[in-house]
Image (tube, rainbow, N blue to C red):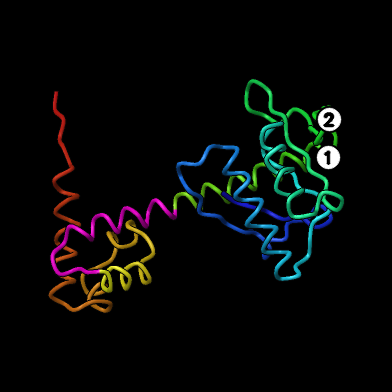
Amino acid sequence: ASCVVYDDGKENRKAYRLFRLHTKNSDYDSMKEVIYRRYFRLLKDNGHLPDGILVDGGQIQINAAKEIISQLGLADNIKIMGLVKDDHHNTRALLDSDGNEFNIAKDDPLFFLLTRMQDEVHRVAINYHRKLRSKAQIHSILDEINGIGPKRKQQLLKTFHNLDNLKLAKEEEIAHVIPANLAHTVYCYLHQNNEEKNIIETS
């Protein structure tokens, strides 16, 4: 999950936060987890609390946020609203914490701001998901190579960050990170796998 922050309508990227959630949680419980972790931490660190929280969802997500905000004693300080979407999954209206809808004209500057916020939070979350998936892939592949243990995997991840970068690396570049004999093994394994997945179609 992701949290993006806007101050006076402008992105505050330094304040963005990412959350790795428990995958078996329901959508309701996941929203509760994000809200709790975010605002409990701000309270603990005496951080700057927002005037409002805009959840990317409807009444279910709003209720989840309300529950946690109330438990943290912040209900009187933070306003919670949600985004209502149409059948095409596009932003249609604002929804307040009591379930009231506020329709916004599509040529209204507020509508453009809300759409931009929604696009931004999606972008950040998707990039984070791709990063986690890439790390999982490289871990999985390296687990199959003899001689590559947790320490070597960590060294490779720290240097190349993801599987695509590792596949593009030259054997000599890998050898700068791990011993040459292991670098040769990793390089050959990755490129052998690539070759085995190639096919030729003729007609």
Residue picked out by circle 1: 110
Decide whether the magenta segment is chiefly helix, strand or loop.
helix
In the image, residue 113 sits, relative to residue 14, either above or below, namely above
Q: Position of residue 167 (x, y in %)?
A: 27, 59
Q: Which residues are magenta?
A: 131-149
Q: Is residue 76 left or right of residue 93?
A: right
Of mark 1 and mark 2, the one earlier in the sequence is: 2
Q: Residues at badges 1 and 2 in contact (C-beta under 8 Å)?
A: yes
The three-letter amino acid code for the residue at tag 2 is Ile
Q: Secondary structure at mark 1?
A: helix
Residue picked out by circle 2: 104
In the image, residue 33 sits, relative to residue 58, either above or below, namely below
Q: Is residue 127 left or right of residue 146?
A: right
Q: The C terminus is located in which quarter?
A: top left
**Magenta stretch holds residue 143:** yes
Q: Position of residue 97 (x, y in %)?
A: 80, 36
Residue 169: image quadrant is: bottom left
Q: How many marks?
A: 2
**Magenta stretch holds residue 13:** no
What residue do we see at 22% from left, 59% from top? 143
Cα distance in 3D space between marks 1 and 2: 8 Å
Q: Residue furthest top?
A: 87
Residue 115: image quadrant is: top right
Q: Position of residue 190 (x, y in %)?
A: 20, 57
Q: Secondary structure at mark 2?
A: loop
In the image, residue 138 sits, relative to residue 180, either above or below, namely above
Q: Position of residue 138 (x, y in %)?
A: 30, 57
What residue do we see at 65% from left, 47% from top? 120
Residue 24: image quadrant is: top left
What residue do we see at 70% from left, 48% from top? 68
